[in-house]
Image: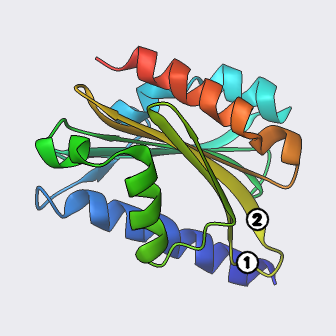
Amino acid sequence: MLSKRLVFVGALRAALLVCAAAGSGQTTVNPNAKACQLLSVPELEAHFGGKAISVRGSDTSTVSMCSVRVKDMRHEATAQLNAPSPASQALTPQQRLEFFANGGIKLSETKVFGSIGCFKTSAPLDKPLPSTGCFLSDAKGYTAVTIASDDSKQTSYEVVKALLEKSAARRK
């Protein structure tokens, strides 16, 4: 059971890094990626009630990704930062949520807070891992934060939206 989770999480991370690398032809995995600067590790440790066990990020010319795992495999925060582009700003939050759903992402629930779109989903592990993601696309680019945890209080829209807003304020 644990090995299936490790394979899934490893495959998911590999897929994210491959997607990030697609635009530039190369990528490096490091905890100092631009998207990692959007996430406060001490804040996430306090949020999840444990120590960070993994911080992994990748940068390309157009996309930066970061994943912070706290305590174990079932407590994780991810951030994505895309460079500004006319295409990323063309969709409203509602249109982007519909695009995600039409692209095969199983969204159990969605909510729009003005310029921020949020959704709930779960990773298809032996025991599904609930997660909530929120995103914002503006003149500084596309920014997204996702929190995964079995504790619904840790993945509420309000919590993830607040983390996204703090992350967006840290963008340069």
**Which is nearer the eye, 71 or 117?**
117
Q: CA distance from mark 1 to mark 2?
A: 7 Å
At x 60%, y 69%, the residue is: 9
At 66% from the left and 50% from the top, the residue drawn is 132
Query: Where's the N terminus, which quadrant?
Result: bottom right
| Residue 78 horizontal/vertical position (percent) | 54, 45
Give the percent coordinates (x, y) of residue 44: 69, 29
Asked whether the beta carbons under mark 1 and mark 2 sit within 8 Å of each other, the answer is yes
Left/right of residue 128 with respect to residue 87 in the rendered view: right
Kindly identify which residue carries mark 1. Answer: 125
| Image: 103 above or below 118 | below
Give the total of numbered labels.
2
- Residue 43, above or below 6: above
Secondary-structure class at tag 2: strand
Q: Which amino acid lies under the numbered mark 1 shown in the image of this protein?
A: Leu
Give the numbered dot on residue 129.
2
Other residues around mark 2 within 10 Å, as few (<14) / some (14–19) / many (≥20) = some
Q: What kind of residue is marked 2? A: Leu
Image quarter of residue 137: top left
Residue 171 image point, x, y percent: 35, 20
**Quadrant in which the C terminus appears:** top left
> Under tag 1, what secondary structure?
loop
Please indicate whether residue 146 sits to the left or right of residue 3 in the image. Answer: left
Answer with the quarter of the image where residue 124 lies. bottom right
In this rendering, the answer to whether 148 lies above or below 165 is below
